[in-house]
Image (tube, rainbow, N blue to C red):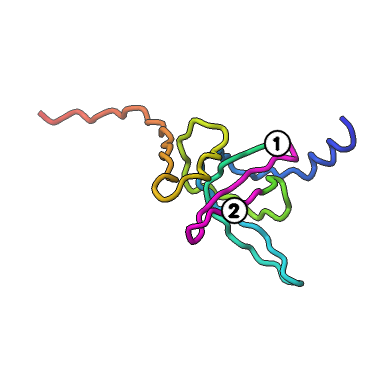
Amino acid sequence: MNIIDTLEKEHMKKDIPQFSVGDQVNVSVKITEGDKERVQLFSGVVIARSGGGFKETFTVRRIVQGEGVERMFPLHSPKLASIKVIKSGRIRRAKLYYMRERTGKGTRLQEKFEKQESKAPSQTPASNQ
């Protein structure tokens, strides 16, 4: 392993939630204004993930006042405060660039529901006769 790989590994974040393309996410970003720092929320749909390892990025798209806004975030950036998955979308593509041409109800994605493991059937008490 060379020096660059070891430096990248020690700066990679460990607490990144599992999310994929099509998921609705809230991304908290640290914004520096002068000498003050605050956290700003950017919420939208993940339309792309690219790269790998330390250089991985993801693109989030949302509609603001009828205008589409996309923002690309480095996954392991120190400027990212947190990523929160709101809901998962059921999609069949790796990149959702076709969402750029869609407006209104056309931008809705089907929601993916996780199967909950059912518990073993419990013993039913014997009925009184």
Work out whether residue 38 or residue 71 is closer to the camera in this orientation and state it: 71
Image vertical order of residue 63 relative to residue 20, above or below: below
Q: Would you say the residues marked 1 and 2 are in contact, meaning their CB atoms lie under 8 Å apart?
A: no
Q: Is residue 24 left or right of residue 123?
A: right
Q: x%, y% of residue 104?
A: 41, 50
In the picture, the quarter occupied by the N terminus is top right
The amino acid beneath tag 2 is Val
| Residue for point 65% across, 45% down | 15
The amino acid beneath tag 1 is Gly
- What residue sits right under mark 1 in the picture? 51
Task: Tell me the element at label 1.
Answer: loop
Mark 2 surroundings: few (<14), some (14-19) or many (≥20) residues within 10 A: many
Which of the 4 image quadrants contains residue 36?
Answer: bottom right
Q: x%, y% of residue 50?
A: 66, 37
Q: Is residue 36 left or right of residue 58?
A: right
| Residue for point 43% across, 41% down | 109
Q: x%, y% of residue 55?
A: 74, 40
Q: Is residue 103 left or right of residue 84?
A: left
- What residue sits right under mark 2 in the picture? 27
View extreme (left): residue:
129
52 drawn magenta: yes
Task: Tell me the element at label 2.
Answer: strand
Work out whether residue 34 or residue 10 is closer to the camera in this orientation and state it: 34
Which of the 4 image quadrants contains residue 79?
Answer: bottom right
Badge number at residue 127 = none
Work out whether residue 15 or residue 127 is closer to the camera in this orientation and state it: 15
Instruction: Measure the alpha-carbon separation of dots 1 and 2.
Output: 19 Å
In the picture, the quarter occupied by the C terminus is top left
Image vertical order of residue 19 relative to residue 72, above or below: above
Q: Which residues are magenta?
A: 51-72
Q: x%, y% of residue 116?
A: 41, 34
Q: Main secondary structure of the magenta part?
A: strand
